[in-house]
């Protein structure tokens, strides 16, 4: 049956995911019933994924301005000024559902999509980070079949990212990986990409000049990915979702690499007016958005679109999500300059239409009108929902951690914690990624708290970190989201860079559930408050709703990606201890309860913990019950995330940047998953041979003192000569300094209140930490659990 | 003295090789487009890493048929110096300029990390400035770096001292754990019998600045530059 013969009814609209009100609105905009192709176009443009209809009202609360921001949310990527006439374009995006349905291609095309967003802006991608969440992969954590499937998904996702990024030639320099039961049937694959462009080379997706030709470039259009955005990304999963595998697109990184080179070269001709990638909703969104942003119309002839197979209908062509395609507007009369660049790179480039003045998106098929829709209402006047919010009922009779007899089995527990997938080394994953190509990687994965890439031709470097803790956000989305911002910013500061701007990827369940919308709204408030306090504008991002399978939502997971800048790349700080005998310090932004010490002669400044500092046992137990230790050792996930103190975070961040700038630090590593003990140990492991002898004093229970995850803290090592200066600078920044030990060789040892509580041979701890992930994932291959 | 860095569609270490030669070592260097049929005027040619033509079919299998490779073959047969890095090594093997093949890594996964390689012969224009047995820390990044050839070829390679680099431990021991991809006899790089063509899987262009983790790759480029200088003074 021909498209034109398919009668559009309210039922058919409902099948396209459009509500009765939305359908009525479509009829009002058109002044008539839509035809089948138009229905398809509206359904994708007004899908949750493309229209942000449930999130828009909340996203407005995010701080998006700052003198450094050249482009905030609304374009393909955010852009910030990084000095020397250069700009950084960066953004994070999710590809969650496709990665569950088909992990390899789902993740691969996730990388491809965000890379296109970056080079569409005229920026060459120089780094990628991946923020990944999977279900448990350790045996015994859940049923065998689920564990085996989670491992398969992890393996496929990692291979997919490697396949695309490695071939394209962008280094995958960092990211994070976490495991929680809620992600078993809904993994998260969030990819952050960063690109660099000269200020004058930036490009925007805004059509200009009626009569200018519209040119299609890149891969041919096929039937793949039809309704990828509207059906895969904008509805929850059911048992039939696996049948949606054909809706997942297939990526070709080689094609994307050619497209990158050709696009950047074409832009240099000066004959390109506007450019937009064909991502979600392909030809539809690229044409509508370019027209709408320019306040103009676009007319395209589908018969001219390069097609992979014959007999495709206008509906299929407009909704196809075939990858590696771009739509650009060239200057009339100079189209040949553009076409010849694409010919050089062996890519299809065809003039398929022109910019018009009438404000309509007109789609022709062999000269006949297949669709005719006003661009602006289609792109900008979609539905906006103020969905109901409801706080979930508080959990009754929570079981919290009961602190054991002090000291019992702490070394053994510490070893178990080091082997927990969330804490263990992720080298098995990142060694599959080319993290060095382009020769800019100063701090690659595992080398520092943030990835650091230099900017060639300048003295500068950029740092990037991503963070997000779904477990904490489930317990308290407001505080959890604040902690995500704080940790990402702290990580960037540990590398010596100043947090400069942020992107986010907001992964939540169904917005139609008031509890989920409440989580979303609270998370936005948390991000807004933290970003405002830390002066980090949000320049864009992505919302991914409907992350639920069979009615169960994932833990709400806002992931923050923070970009930092550093004036002098040679001052980047890593996490590895550097020399035996260096002094290990804990820097603590939280100075409550600390007495100010100002010693005579102006020689010693600082804060000291008075012996009578009050300890609130109930709060400690509640906050400790949400830690990685509580989950791994006690099997408890309860209570509340650690309270956040943004002023303390801000002081610590400022101090870390100052110390790095004055070259006073040998290493820096923030206290996060696994607490102080894990932080102290990780700096040993990264050093490849050094150890630490630590002596702590605390009134907290031993487990909380060693493994508690309170923020605003970092472990640094300094040479003995610099110790005095570091104390002095820290006092100026009002950050407490606690000298806790020395970098050593041999045994890793922690003494707490005068008693040795952890002691072990360092190489054996390092082996445990290094090999844990590989051991789990290889056992899958041998064991064939299902 | 002029270096050429070939750009195939899909090359992605071309800029890195260019940067190492031009910016770090201050040598004259130009890109050579894959459709060039003429490489005259160049003194040494680098085939860079990447995924030429997407590495579809087999790594390097399509690139060997590109117009520039006919010119590179002629250049090599006339004694010109050719360095193939990673994908470039794969292309040289496919083109028959070097013996053997590069198969999928034994672990069946892409591997990116620092490795150690030992200089097995200083009798090449690419290693003349190194000390015999010198161990270099140079990164690898490949999915298909598992060198293989038949026994007769291996014997030939050994007899003619054509094995230029072997994977070893940091202290130069050749053991299985030091072999990142299952390569036969821990082979990381080889040369042709005439010794003017070298291919290796590790990326020396990524190891020319200490800030990036190692500058051990410099010795390879310095050898190359010194050899070319010597050649120039001889012919002058």
Image (cartoon, coloured by chain):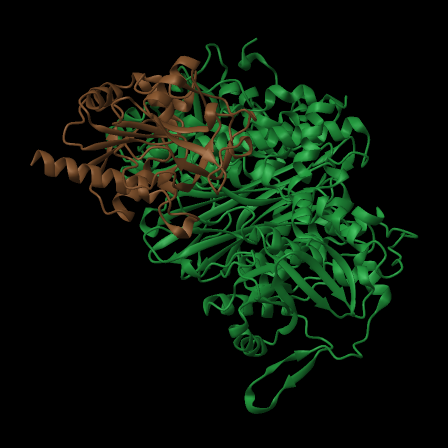
Query: Which residue is more in the foreground, B123 or A721?
Result: B123
- Residue at the image position 67 percent from the left and 63 percent from the top: A693
- Quadrant of res B219: top left
Question: Quick one: which chain is brown?
Answer: B
Whether residue A422 appears in this view of the structure is yes
Q: In the image, A626: left or right of A25? A: right
Which quadrant is home to the N terminus of chain A? top right
Q: Residue A296, relative to residue B74: is it above or below?
A: below
Q: In the image, A127: left or right of A182? A: left
Query: Which residue is more in the foreground, A626 or A9?
Result: A626
- Residue at the image position 30 percent from the left and 16 percent from the top: B65
Query: Which residue is more in the foreground, A659 or A293?
Result: A659
- Residue at the image position 51 percent from the left and 31 percent from the top: B179
Q: Total of numbered circles in the picture?
A: 0
As drawn, which residue projects farthest toward the top?
Answer: A1
Q: Position of residue A578 (x, y in %)?
A: 53, 59
Q: Residue B213, relative to residue A142: is it above or below?
A: below
- Quadrant of res A489: bottom right
Display colour for chain A: green
As drawn, which residue projects farthest toward the right?
Answer: A397
Q: Position of residue A515 (x, y in %)?
A: 78, 46
Which quadrant is home to the C terminus of chain A? top right
Q: In the image, A464: left or right of A61? A: left
């Amino acid at each position: 049956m021909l498209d034109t013969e398919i009668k559009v009814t309210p039922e058919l609209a409902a099948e396209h995911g459009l509500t009765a009100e939305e359908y009525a609105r479509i009829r009002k905009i058109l002044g008539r019933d839509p035809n089948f192709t138009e229905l398809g176009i509206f359904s994708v443009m007004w899908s949750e994924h493309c229209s942000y209809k449930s999130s828009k009202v909340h996203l407005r609360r995010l701080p998006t301005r700052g003198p450094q921001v050249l482009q905030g949310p609304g374009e393909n990527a955010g852009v910030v000024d990084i000095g020397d006439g250069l700009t950084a374009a960066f953004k994070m995006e999710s590809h969650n559902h496709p990665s569950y349905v088909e992990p390899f291609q789902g993740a691969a095309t996730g990388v491809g999509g965000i890379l296109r967003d970056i080079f569409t802006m005229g920026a060459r991608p120089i780094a990628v980070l991946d923020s990944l969440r999977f279900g448990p992969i350790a045996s015994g954590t859940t049923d065998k079949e689920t564990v085996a499937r989670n491992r398969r998904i992890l393996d496929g996702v990692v291979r997919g990212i490697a396949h695309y990024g490695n071939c394209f030639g962008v280094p995958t320099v960092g990211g994070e990986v976490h495991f929680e039961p809620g992600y078993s049937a809904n993994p998260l694959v969030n990819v952050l990409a960063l690109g660099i462009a000269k200020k004058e080379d930036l490009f925007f997706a805004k059509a200009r000049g009626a009569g200018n030709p519209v040119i299609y470039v890149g891969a041919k259009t096929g039937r793949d990915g039809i309704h990828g955005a509207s059906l895969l990304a904008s509805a929850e999963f059911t048992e039939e979702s696996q049948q949606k595998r054909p809706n997942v697109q297939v990526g070709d990184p080689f094609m994307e690499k050619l497209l990158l080179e050709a696009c950047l070269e074409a832009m240099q001709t000066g004959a390109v007016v506007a450019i937009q990638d064909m991502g979600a909703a392909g030809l539809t969104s690229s044409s509508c958005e370019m027209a709408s942003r320019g306040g103009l119309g676009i007319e395209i002839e589908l018969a001219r679109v390069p097609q992979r197979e014959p007999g495709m209908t206008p509906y299929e062509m407009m909704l196809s999500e075939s990858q590696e395609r771009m739509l650009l507007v060239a200057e009339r009369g100079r189209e040949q300059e553009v076409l010849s660049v694409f010919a050089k790179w062996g890519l299809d480039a065809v003039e398929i239409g022109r910019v018009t003045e009438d404000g309509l998106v007109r789609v022709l098929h062999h000269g006949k009108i297949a669709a005719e829709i006003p661009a602006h209402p289609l792109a900008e006047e979609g539905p906006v929902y103020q969905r109901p919010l409801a706080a979930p009922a508080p959990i009754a009779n929570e079981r919290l951690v009961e602190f054991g007899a002090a000291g019992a089995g702490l070394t053994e527990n510490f070893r178990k914690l080091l082997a927990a997938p969330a804490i263990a080394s992720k080298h098995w994953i990142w060694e599959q990624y080319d993290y060095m190509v382009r020769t800019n990687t100063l701090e690659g994965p595992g080398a520092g708290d943030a990835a650091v890439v230099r900017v060639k031709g300048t003295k500068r470097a950029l740092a990037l970190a991503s963070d997000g803790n779904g477990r904490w956000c489930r317990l308290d989305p407001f505080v959890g989201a604040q902690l995500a911002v704080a940790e990402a910013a702290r990580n960037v500061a540990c590398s010596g860079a100043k947090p400069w701007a942020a992107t986010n990827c907001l992964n939540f369940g169904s917005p139609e559930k008031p509890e989920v919308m409440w989580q979303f709204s609270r998370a936005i408030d948390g991000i807004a408050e933290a970003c405002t306090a830390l002066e980090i504008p949000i320049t864009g991002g992505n919302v991914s709703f409907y992350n639920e399978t069979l009615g169960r939502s994932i833990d709400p997971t806002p992931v923050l990606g923070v970009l930092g800048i550093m004036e002098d790349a040679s001052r980047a700080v890593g996490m590895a201890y550097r020399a035996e005998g260096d002094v290990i310090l804990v820097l603590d932004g939280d100075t409550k309860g600390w007495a100010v010490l100002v010693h005579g002669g102006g020689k010693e400044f600082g804060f000291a913990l008075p012996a009578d500092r009050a300890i609130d046992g109930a709060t400690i137990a509640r906050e400790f019950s949400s830690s990685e230790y509580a989950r791994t050792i006690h099997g408890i996930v309860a209570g509340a995330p650690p309270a956040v103190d943004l002023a303390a975070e801000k002081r610590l961040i400022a101090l870390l940047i100052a110390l790095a700038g004055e070259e006073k630090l040998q290493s820096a590593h923030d206290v996060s998953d696994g607490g102080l003990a894990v932080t102290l140990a990780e700096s040993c492991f990264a050093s490849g041979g050094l150890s630490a002898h630590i002596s702590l004093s605390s009134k907290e229970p031993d487990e909380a003192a060693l493994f508690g995850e309170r923020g605003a803290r970092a472990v640094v090592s300094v040479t003995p000569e610099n110790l005095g200066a570091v104390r002095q600078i820290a006092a100026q920044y009002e950050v407490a300094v606690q000298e806790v030990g020395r970098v050593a060789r041999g045994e890793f040892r922690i003494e707490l209140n005068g008693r040795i509580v952890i002691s072990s041979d360092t190489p054996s701890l390092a082996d445990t930490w290094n090999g844990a992930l590989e051991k789990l994932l290889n056992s899958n291959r041998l064991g064939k659990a299902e | 003295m002029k270096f050429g860095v070939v750009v195939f569609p899909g090359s992605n270490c071309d800029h890195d090789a260019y940067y190492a030669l031009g910016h770090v070592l201050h040598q004259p260097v130009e890109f050579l487009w894959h459709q060039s049929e003429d490489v005259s005027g160049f003194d040494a040619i680098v085939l860079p890493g990447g995924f030429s033509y997407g590495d579809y079919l087999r790594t390097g299998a399509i690139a060997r048929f590109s117009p520039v490779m006919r010119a590179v073959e002629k250049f090599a047969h006339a004694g010109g110096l050719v360095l193939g890095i990673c994908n470039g090594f794969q292309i040289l093997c496919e083109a028959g300029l070097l013996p053997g093949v590069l198969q999928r890594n034994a672990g069946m996964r892409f591997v990116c990390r620092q490795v150690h390689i030992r200089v097995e012969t200083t009798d090449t224009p690419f290693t003349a400035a190194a000390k015999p047995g010198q161990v270099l820390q140079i990164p690898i990044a490949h999915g298909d770096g598992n060198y293989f050839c038949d026994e007769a070829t291996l014997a030939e390679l050994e007899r003619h001292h054509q094995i230029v680099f072997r994977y070893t431990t940091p202290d130069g021991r050749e053991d299985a754990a030091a072999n990142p991809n299952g390569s036969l006899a821990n082979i990381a790089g080889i040369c042709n019998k005439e010794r003017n063509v070298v291919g290796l899987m590790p990326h020396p262009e990524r190891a020319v600045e200490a800030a990036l983790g190692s500058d051990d790759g410099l010795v390879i480029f310095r050898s190359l530059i010194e050899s070319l200088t010597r050649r120039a003074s001889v012919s002058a």
